[in-house]
Image (tube, rainbow, N blue to C red):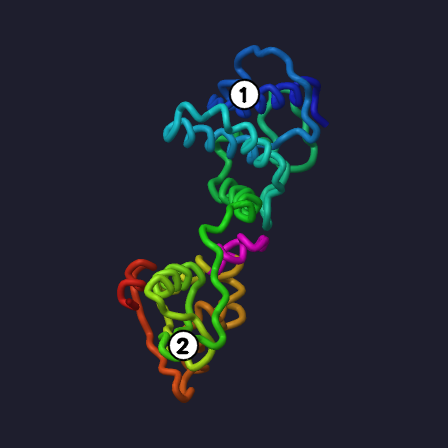
Amino acid sequence: MTQPGYDEGVASWSAHLRSGGTTTWSAWRATDHDPVPRLHPTPDATHLELVRRLNLAANRSDPAGLADLADLADLVLGTGTPGRGRIDVPLPWPSTLRPFGAPPIEPDEVPAEELNRLAVGVLARLLPGVPPQRAEPEPVRWPLPWRRRFRLHGSPETVAVVRRMLLDQGLVESDWRPVHVILGRPVDVMLGEHWATRTRAGGSMTLGTVWRRALAAGRLPRSVDLPRVARQLDGRRHEPVHVVLGRDAQHVAALTG
């Protein structure tokens, strides 16, 4: 049970953070402040500390942009922590009695993995709203015979970069007797691209979960498992297969061109 004063103090600090403040909880609670309405539910230490650190980062990069952080703070405070972690972590308060539940912790001492876990949940809610840079063209089924045809295989973002380059050169993406090009980068980078694409489409799994599931299944996603793609394409008549390996998407595009 929480004694009177705790909820009001947390609400006061929350209002300070929503306005772009960066004062720590220990410094804030040591001074008197005007009362503000209580919040329902009362935010916990993890959510409020993530807001404070986002304010610190914004203050370093753009001091004039702090007034625009209220919406981001509301998004953080309204996001549930994904995965298995600490839930409803209270803040220290002199008159707080909690015979059960998580023990209080200073927000600036919340473990980094808990802040990262919550940040992943916030990022997953933000990514679907990011507009794509360019709509991907539909593959041409029956291109003109004098136009060179290709089909790309690999992680989504690398494929998108190379596709734009080849289309700008006048080549045609097609399933009819194409030249297959397998685009390779480090496995962790390709898996990250696969996860980012799934997340933008509404997926909620963390990158760590995707990696652990791939290890447990003994198989990578098709866009990342390039040896499997090569085996599936091997032996097709009139459809040569090329493998291009590079350190980044631009390097792969340059080697492909």
Classify residue 201 by image quadrant: bottom right
Under circle 2, the secondary element is helix
| Residue 117 visible in the current orientation | no
Residue 115 is situated, as x and y percent measured from the top left of the image, at: 51, 40
Three-letter residue code for mark 2: Pro
Query: Looking at the image, which residue is at 36% across and 75% down?
Result: 148
> Relative to the observer, which residue lies in front, 235 or 98?
235
Q: Position of residue 231 (x, y in %)?
A: 42, 82
Let me know if residue 156 is in the magenta part: no
Amino acid on which disc 1 is placed: His
Q: Look at mark 2 in the image and give the residue it sits on.
A: 227
Q: Which quadrant of the rendered structure holds the N terminus? A: top right
Towards the viewer: 96 or 38: 38
* Segment tinted magenta in the rendering: 194-208
Instruction: Choose mark 2 or mark 1, whichever is in front.
Output: 2
Judge the density around disc 1: few (<14), some (14-19), many (≥20) Cα neighbours within 10 Å.
some
Query: For this view, does 225 lie left or right of residue 16?
Result: left
Question: 240 or 246, which lies in front?
Answer: 240
Q: CA distance from mark 2 to mark 1?
A: 54 Å
Residue at position x 49%, y 43% in the image: 116
Q: How many badges with numbers are in the image?
A: 2
Mark with earlier residue (2, 1): 1
* Residue 16: assigned label: 1
Q: x%, y% of residue 248?
A: 32, 59
